[in-house]
Amino acid sequence: MGARWTHLITNGVAAFLVLGVGGGSAVADGGALESGHAATATATATAGTYVGLTPVRILDTRADSGLPYSGMTLGAGATLNVEVTGTNGVPKTGVGAVVLNVTVVGPTESSFLTVFPQGASQPVVSNVNFTAGATLANLVTVPVGAQGGVAIYNHTGSTDVVIDL
């Protein structure tokens, strides 16, 4: 089995954690210099090691944010699919899971978000619970779906969402 990657944030520094069986090595982009712009540096790691990566904002649904998914506020019962592999320094293949900082901004009602693998059945758990008007963040570890993405579900009301990888 080849190496599998997951993104991990520790002490404000992001890193890839290589998951998998056996030796071998893999190469991942070294991160991002600013939102949406991948850095040119590369790093090599063997299974079970960390490779540094600069955190990057991959989603902001607030109107005029200028980032992916701008203006796509999540309404009641809405699910938004977010691509995470093959962008922002994340390898296109071999990614097992990602660690995301998921923030709700300006929710209209008390509700919750559930983050789960894109294409999978929605689990009956929540990842971020919030009250109306709150701005609240939570660190979420989630497997990526076969398509390389995650899905975000909002239960009631509407809210904007910001995600940092």
Image (spheres, rainbow, N blue to C red):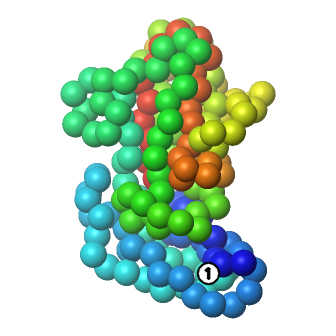
Q: Residue at x 32, y 39 (%)?
A: 68
Find residue 61 and report its horizontal and vertical position in percent.
36, 29
Q: Is residue 159 above or below residue 139?
A: above
Horizontal relation, residue 70 to residue 118: left or right: left
Q: Residue at x 27, y 75 (%)?
A: 40
Residue found farthest to the bottom: 23
Q: Residue at x 38, y 40 (%)?
A: 59
Find residue 90 and report its horizontal and vertical position in percent.
45, 63
Find residue 162 and report its horizontal and vertical position in percent.
42, 36
Horizontal relation, residue 112 to residue 70: left or right: right
Q: Residues within 10 Å of mark 1 (few under 14, many from 20)?
A: some
Horizontal relation, residue 26 to residue 62: left or right: right
Q: Quadrant of residue 128?
A: top right
User: The residue under label 1 is which amino acid type?
Assistant: Thr
Q: Secondary structure at mark 1?
A: loop
Q: Quadrant of residue 18?
A: bottom right
Q: Residue at x 37, y 24 (%)?
A: 72
Q: Quadrant of residue 114?
A: top right
Q: Is residue 153 above or below residue 132?
A: below
Q: Is residue 38 visible?
A: yes
Q: Is residue 22 or residue 33 the one in the foreground?
A: 22
Q: Is residue 117 above or below residue 56?
A: above
Report the residue marked by disc 1. 49
Find residue 98 and report its horizontal and vertical position in percent.
58, 55
Quadrant of image for the N terminus:
bottom right
Q: Is residue 130 visible?
A: no
Horizontal relation, residue 36 to residue 113: left or right: left
Q: How many marks?
A: 1
Q: Is residue 51 above or below residue 88?
A: below
